[in-house]
Image (cartoon, rainbow, N blue to C red):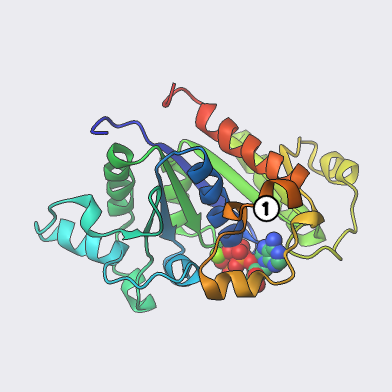
């Protein structure tokens, strides 16, 4: 390491509870199988819970990074991260949501930049509000991954956002239709969604990735995609996860 090589990927949604966090953790699992070092930055500053979701106790958070950086106490980035396994580290969101308001967005860019020296991939989990933090993050990351469900509100919001992105000539995004959050939601066909959005759906995680006992995975701090049987049990969706992982590393030119 030591070179600024890390690929920065922001996972966004326009509605809460679409499955961003579960997806992000599982994508990190995929990168473990590819032996790529991943940092999950939990930048859902007021509601983040990645470290808890994977059952890892932690002391320091993004708040401590910002506070130390601001007060010239910063030494090394790895003092702030929590280890999950040999390949996955986590930079947790603030323990106290009140600390979130004290985080100046410009320090988030700083944290992302520091992480690029230590990791192959930086996955950034976010809050769904398009607030100041997320606007900064949308500009700061190399790749944007929008997660949406099969849901009329999501489709309408996404259409609106795509129009704004078109205006801004922003093209570094991919859309993921995540059907695993609620397999009963199937109002639109894939064709419908593409026609309404007048855009491509880049990836489609199917309802087969719906994991009935997802809560016990969370309680035990386990990652579904890291289970030995995952490639066979989730066959097509596992392949999609791999494709997403590989594509996101390839897109742009940073990691080539
Ligand atoms: N593959 C899955 N199988 C079963 N349940 C799932 C799956 N993925 C997500 N869920 C469930 O959907 C709910 C929302 O998931 P998650 O917390 O990942 O969404 P989010 O977009 O991060 O939400 P928020 O906007 O609140 O951060 C959770 O209760 C989670 O357990
Ligand atoms: Mg979340």
Residue 228 location in percent, x, y?
62, 52
Against 81, residue 49 (above or below) is: below
Q: Is 144 displayed left or right of 3 in the figure?
A: right
Quadrant position of the C terminus in the picture: top left
Q: Looking at the image, which residue is at 33% across and 52% down? A: 108
> Is 80 in front, or is 136?
80
Assess mark 1: CB under 8 A from ligand 1?
no
**Res. 23 visible in picture:** yes
Residue 220 location in percent, x, y?
53, 73
> Is 204 in front, or is 144?
204
Mark 1 — residue? 229
Q: Looking at the image, which residue is at 55% across and 42% down? A: 144
Q: Image quadrant of ligand 2?
A: bottom right
Against 229, residue 2 (above or below) is: above
Quadrant position of the N terminus in the picture: top left
Where disc 1 sits, the SS reads: loop
Q: Is 20 displayed left or right of 115 in the figure?
A: right
Location of residue 30 (image quadrant): top right
**Res. 251 visible in picture:** no
Residue 246 location in percent, x, y?
57, 32
Seen as rendered, the residue at the extreme left is 72
Residue 176 location in percent, x, y?
69, 46
């Amino acid at each position: 390491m030591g070179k600024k090589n890390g690929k920065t990927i922001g996972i966004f949604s326009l509605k809460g509870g679409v499955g961003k966090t579960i997806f992000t953790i599982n994508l990190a699992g995929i990168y473990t199988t590819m032996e790529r070092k991943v940092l999950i930055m939990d930048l859902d500053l007021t509601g983040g819970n990645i470290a808890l979701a994977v059952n890892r106790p932690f002391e320091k958070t993004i708040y401590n990074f910002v506070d130390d950086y601001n007060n010239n106490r910063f030494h090394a980035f790895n003092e702030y991260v929590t280890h999950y396994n040999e390949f996955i580290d986590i930079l947790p969101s603030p323990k106290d949501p009140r600390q979130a308001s004290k985080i100046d967005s410009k320090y988030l860019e700083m944290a992302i930049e520091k992480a690029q020296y230590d990791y192959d991939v930086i996955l950034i989990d976010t809050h769904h509000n398009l607030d100041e933090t997320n606007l900064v993050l949308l500009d700061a990351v190399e790749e944007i991954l929008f997660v949406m469900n099969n849901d009329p509100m999501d489709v309408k919001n996404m259409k609106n956002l795509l129009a704004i992105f078109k205006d801004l000539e922003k093209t570094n995004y991919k859309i993921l239709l995540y059907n695993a959050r609620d397999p009963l939601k199937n109002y639109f066909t894939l064709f419908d969604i593409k026609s309404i959005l007048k855009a491509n759906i880049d990836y489609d995680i199917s309802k087969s990735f719906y994991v009935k006992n997802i809560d016990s995975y969370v309680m035990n701090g386990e990652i579904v995609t890291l289970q030995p049987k995952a490639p066979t049990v989730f066959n097509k969706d596992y392949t999609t996860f791999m494709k997403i992982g590989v594509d996101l590393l390839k897109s742009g030119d940073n990691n080539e």
